Amino acid sequence: MARTESKMLPLGTKAPDFTLIDAVTNKPVSLKNVRGEKGTVIMFICNHCPFVKHVNEEIVRICNDYRVTGFGFVAINSNDVINYPDDSPAKMWVTARKHNYTFPYLFDETQEVAKAYDAACTPDFYLFDDELKLVYRGQLDNSRPGNGIPVNGRDLREALDNLLNNNPQRKDQKPSIGCNIKWK
């Protein structure tokens, strides 16, 4: 199991715009469509990565808990589906249905969006404020497959709560660790 860290895009970076096809609805979805009133969470995930499989249920819980408070959520799969067919849009649809994703699951076929966000691994989490400026990037929490630490989403939840309550973000944001994005 490869262990790749986030590249930690600089805080304050403006969210790069995108329009990608949602694997569930087969319709285009843009940043404007998913933007939340309070903030926006952009997640780079995929179907086959054991690190993503490990946190899928908590990702859905966080989305359900915070969407009602004004946050928007979207997941993006940027993996090369020729060499990794388990990440194809058809299988993205299956994964989204299996885990009851309540957020769009977009396919970044050209990998341009992953490059714009400097995404490096799956999962990789980015939280932007109401002006689409980056306030948090990094890990969901300290849990990893096999390390015995329960998945609770502590780091991302804390960042969402800080944004919701106008509190400063932690300075010691930890990079996410997961499978590397499968580049073409």
Image (cartoon, helix red, strand yellow):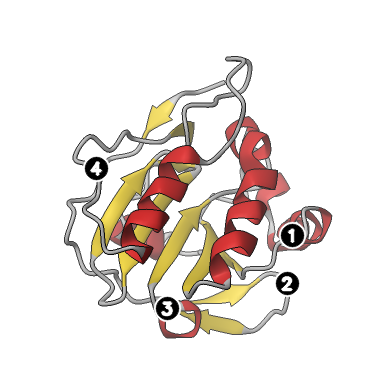
Of labels 1 and 4, earlier in sequence is: 1
Of labels 2 and 4, earlier in sequence is: 2
- How far apart are the two marked residues, 1 and 2, measured between alpha carbons? 7 Å
- How far apart are the two marked residues, 1 and 4, measured between alpha carbons? 31 Å
Residue picked out by circle 3: 31
Q: Secondary structure at mark 1?
A: helix
Q: Secondary structure at mark 3?
A: helix
Residue picked out by circle 1: 96
Q: Is residue 78 visible?
A: yes
- How far apart are the two marked residues, 1 and 3, measured between alpha carbons? 19 Å
What amino acid does circle 3 point to?
Leu
Report if the CB atoms under discs 1 and 2 are less than 8 Å apart. yes
Of labels 4 and 3, earlier in sequence is: 3
Q: Residue at x 44, y 62 (%)?
A: 41
Q: Toward the viewer: 45 or 78?
A: 45
- How far apart are the two marked residues, 4 and 3, measured between alpha carbons? 25 Å
Residue 69 higher or lower than 13, as above or below: below
Residue picked out by circle 4: 170
Q: Residue at x 60, y 50 (%)?
A: 59
Of labels 1 and 3, earlier in sequence is: 3
